[in-house]
Amino acid sequence: MPHNKAHQLLHSANKQNVPKAVNLLQSLFDLVKLKLDWEHLPLLWKHFREITFLARVLSYFLFPFVDVEMSIVHQIQSISTFVHLITAMFQKHKTSFLTSTLIADLQAIAKSNIFNTAQLQIVDPESRYYILFEGTDRLEGVFSYARTQDLACNFDILQLAQKLSIGAKVNTIFQCYPDLDCSHICHNLAKARGVDHVNPKSWIGDVHVKNVDIQAEYYTGRDKANSLLRKHFGKDAVKDNKCDLNLVFLVYPKHQAQILIQRCLG
């Protein structure tokens, strides 16, 4: 990668540029595949090893949302690997690794994906489950419908309510009649870089919930996480079979909230 391109990815003026952030993570993951002779570069090898480890960790969360060739089986497995990795890292390094808010949000997303898959297996095993619906894409879609109804730069609360109501109706029509929605121009997203706002119509992988054994993929993800932790940090970093991912803060969230309230009340 040219130096100027790497500099643009690392020093983006727009901190909310999602395609550039996704491209950065994909570029970091490309480093994992590099085969270089590090014998005479021990210091550089140490930095490279840390960067590639972080790239691996983040890739297990990123790819289930942007790799349109992934099946629901591999998505659940990848998410399981990710949550086991970040739990182990957070319990070891606390907020030096990730902030408490971010780790809680990531755990909530993973839990929601797995629980929704299990629920759909009971309610409608033949249904397809697109985990990209768990994001804010559809909310941003409604916002775009509301924002582009006229050329007004500002509007009051009443106008906002009216615009959101119309936007929700437009969104409902497009969901009922997807052929009316032109959506994204790029329909082939396989191996694409810097992907954002993925359309379910572009997803290639099999996402029928009946085809996934959640428990088996969850344990497979845990084993993959342990393998990576063992390779990078040694056997002491491995999470055992009784690892409770709800105890990432070493106390259940409900109990933690009660403790915080008691502290605030003195």
Image (spheres, rainbow, N blue to C red):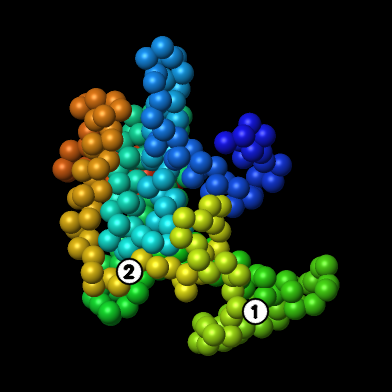
Q: Residue at x 32, y 63 (%)?
A: 71
Nearer to us of marks 2 and 1 is: 2
On screen, 180 above or below 36?
A: below
On screen, 75 above or below 186?
A: above
Which residue was labeled with disc 2?
A: 206
On the picture, is 198 further left or further right than 131?
right
Residue 157, percent across and down? 74, 73
Q: Amino acid at mark 2?
A: Asp
SS type, badge 2: loop
* Residue 57 in sight in this render: yes
Q: Amino acid at mark 1?
A: Gly
* Residue toward you, 181 or 221: 181
Circle 2 residues within 10 Å: few <14, some 14–19, many ≥20: some
Disc with the residue nearer the chain's start (2 vs 1)? 1
Residue 167: mark: 1
Residue 251, percent across and down? 31, 42
SS type, badge 1: helix
Residue 135, percent across and down? 49, 62
